[in-house]
Amino acid sequence: MLYTFVTLFPEWFASPLSTGLMARAREAGIVDFAFVNPRDMTHDRHRTVDDRPYGGGPGMVLMLEPLVEALRALPRPGRMLALSPDGRPLTQALARELAAEPALTLICGRYEGFDARLFDLLPIERVAVGDAVLNGGEAAALALVEATARLQPGFMGKDESGDEESFSRGLLEYPHYTRPEIFEGHAVPEELLSGDHARVAQWRRRQALLHTLRSRPELLDHAALSARDREWLAAQARFRPGKNLYTALLHHPVRLRENLTGTTSLTNLDVHDIARISRTYGLGGVFVVTPLEDQRRLLNTLLDHWLDGAGARSNPDRAEALRLVCPAPSLDAAVNAVSERCGTPPCVVGTSASPALDRKGREKRPAATFDEVRQRLGHGSVLLVLGTGHGLAPEALDRCDAVLPPLRWMDAYNHLPVRAAAAILLDRLLGDRG
């Protein structure tokens, strides 16, 4: 594999590419490196490679002429990759794909980055290494080299070494131990000392699963998991942040047709389905909010049937879900109920299918992201308010501390039924991958 670095600082790579396994692989002819400095392609006495950006602003931009000339002169460019934060994320799957290439050219940016026309002129792919800002592309290029070179036959010495490491099979790697068996009171797990290869293999598999669940749960979506893996993982996931999350299905005040504010009637399907969804995601409770006494009586009749009547005997699972449901005469009453249960007032988070406007027609602030709501769940309770009819009225939005963005805000048609919206919202907040 030939790596060609296009960089203003070729000396930056001297030590890392001449150390350890990389040095041995280079001596063995497994990898080779070439360097091209765009300054060598300049034609002015100052060897200028950057200039001020059109439109003004801070910083400098790499000039096209030296870069394009350098790239067009390469004898074996292979796939050309620009290290850029807007590129395709460097994953183990991409590393395997790139490792199959005979040659790669790695273009290292500096200053404010590349002139955008570079990507129109040449077949350059962008690759991103992490979500942090670096001084230049050199460190990212080195990470890409490390990830791909080690996949070359013979690089690791023992080729199966790479098969058990983090991300190789969609999971983070299990923990490792070496001598002594006990150090400052900390012992090596007894499974690793047992001499039982099957027991060791099972321990390593489960530790990899557990490490991934705790540190990078989103990876589990893409890992090849057996039914036994899933059963074991479910038993480990004891902490459920959903216990701090409550929903309020609001029937007043909500928007009706022609932007009027009013009250909607309770819907049997909404109560059942939102209760089942909430139980699935481990919520603390579901408040059905209506100021109408006859509607609350209807709700109590429904709950009595399923909790204490014939429904409880015929369908215990439905009864388990409906135990979460509590009638409330107002949103404030629901807030007070959560406060009593949790000891502190909840953060009230509204939902809306359109930009949330207050009673004066202004956009409701502050908006909340799903990440921010998840973080709040780690420190206190949250009451998620769902609107019936055409959504929460401005009066209800005024009562909210924050409002989540619409689920389908980039599409003109955004009319999900409230129980479908509830399922999507709760999955984004509490889904196994997040």
Image: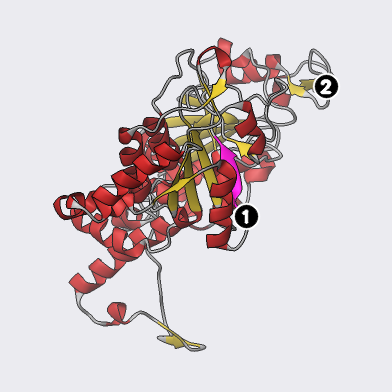
> Could you tell me the amino acid type at mark 2?
Gly
The furthest residue to the front = 294
Q: Residue at x 40, y 56 (%)?
A: 212
Residue 430 visible: yes
The location of residue 433, given as percent across then percent down, is 40, 46
As measured in the structure, the alpha-carbon distance from the residue carrying label 2 to the one carrying label 1 is 45 Å
Vertical placement of residue 165 versus 389, above or below = below
- In the picture provided, is 344 more to the left or to the right than 196? right
The location of residue 169, given as percent across then percent down, is 31, 49
Q: Which label is found at residue 345?
A: 1
> Could you tell me the amino acid type at mark 1?
Pro
Marks 1 and 2: in contact by CB < 8 Å? no
The location of residue 149, given as percent across then percent down, is 43, 44
Q: Quadrant of residue 209?
A: bottom left
Q: Which residue is mark 2?
A: 57
157 and 119: which is toward the camera:
119
Give the SS element for disc 2.
loop
Quadrant in the picture for the N terminus: top left
Give the SS element for disc 1.
loop
Vertical placement of residue 57 versus 173, above or below = above
Q: Residue at x 60, y 33 (%)?
A: 396
The crowd level at tag 2 (other Cα within 10 Å; few <14, some 14-19, many 20+) is few
Q: Earlier in the sequence, mark 2 or mark 1?
A: 2
32 and 217: which is toward the camera:
217
Region rendered in magenta: 345-350
